[in-house]
Every structure is written in structure tokens, then in C-alpha cells.
Amino acid sequence: MQAYPQGQQPVLNQPTVTVQPAAQTVIQVTQVIGNPMMPRGPARDWTTELFACCDDMTICLCAICVPSYPCMLAADMDESCCVPMCIPSALISMRAVVRSRHNINGNLMNDCVCMTFCGYCATCQLAREVQMVKNGRAIP
């Protein structure tokens, strides 16, 4: 038998490890207002027709004659004026953004076809819509 120094006793129990419960992670799910993937009621049509370019001759002439007009249009949309210079096919994206923001009928393929084959008319339609929305005259 082993002798222990005076005043010390042998350890009879093994040390125990106390496990604290892990911190709880709380996940809160909230609905994002304005999420384009969530239905927002019935969609509407564009305020003006695609080929109604002559309805606003100022917009028509600017779209045709002013090379920086897409930059001005982006600024009217509260986007960076650099968007048309930095993003390929920016007018397609800008049209899709306006359509999504204002719950207008259509889809990305339609935006692409309109901007590809009727670019000036689609740009004019987009500019008229942005102007109508800014002036509060867009159809709800």
C-alpha cells in the first residue's frame, strides 16, 4: 500500500466537466415590403404605349439626339448616372427595374425584345413612365 504525505488524502472521484448550454440563436422571419417576388395586387399596364414616341417630343428628340440621355434617365430613376456606362445593356435593366418597382405587366424577355428591336421607342416609353411617376400622374 502506498503511503500519502501527512494531511493529504487520495482522490476518490474523478474531476467532472460541467457542460453549459450553448447560446441560443434566434431567427426572426419578417416579410420584406416591396419584395418583387411577393405578389402586390393586380399589375397594371405601362401608362403610355410603346410606339407613342411623339406623345412627348422633348423626350423623343432627347432619346434620339442626346447620347448621354440614358444617364439623365438613370438619374431621374434615382439610380447612379453611371449605370448606363458601366452595365452592359443597362436600358434593359432599367426598364425591368421600373416595371418591377411600379408593378407593371411584363417580363424580362419582353424588356429585352423591346429594347433590342425598338430601342428608341422603348427608351421613350421608359422615360415617359418615369416622368409620369415622378409627377404623380401614373395610373395606380
Image (spheres, helix red, strand yellow):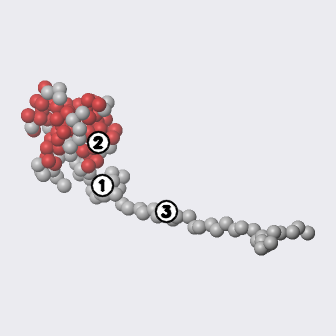
Tell me the tag on residue 34: 1
Answer yes or no: is residue 33 visible: yes
Q: Amino acid at mark 2?
A: Ala
Please state which of residues 17 and 3 is positioned toward the viewer in this rendering: 3
Q: Amino acid at mark 3?
A: Thr
Q: On the picture, is 38 further left or further right than 4?
A: left
Residue 53 x %, y %: 14, 35
Q: Label 3, secondary structure: give it.
A: loop
Please state which of residues 19 and 100 is positioned toward the viewer in this rendering: 19
Tell me where residue 2 sits by quadrant. Answer: bottom right
Rendered-image quadrant of the C terminus? bottom left
According to the image, label 3 marks what residue? 25
Vertical side of 125 occupied by 10: above or below:
below
Residue at the right extreme of this rendering: 1
Label 1 Cα neighbours within 10 Å, binned few <14 / some 14-19 / many ≥20: few
Please state which of residues 41 and 70 is positioned toward the viewer in this rendering: 70
Q: Residue at x 10, y 30 (%)?
A: 61
Name the front one of labels 3 and 2. 3
Residue at the front extreme of this rendering: 6
Q: Which numbered disc flags the more N-terminal residue, 3 or 1?
A: 3
Residue 69 x %, y %: 16, 31
Q: Residue at x 9, y 37 (%)?
A: 56
According to the image, label 2 marks what residue? 96
Vertical side of 47 occupied by 52: above or below:
above
Tell me the tag on residue 97: none
Q: Which numbered disc flags the more N-terminal residue, 3 or 2?
A: 3
Q: For the residues marked 3 and 2, what is the alpha-carbon distance in whole angstroms?
A: 37 Å
Q: On the picture, is 39 further left or further right than 65?
A: right
Name the front one of labels 3 and 1. 3
Label 3 Cα neighbours within 10 Å, binned few <14 / some 14-19 / many ≥20: few
Rendered-image quadrant of the N terminus? bottom right
Q: For the residues marked 1 and 2, what is the alpha-carbon distance in whole angstroms?
A: 15 Å
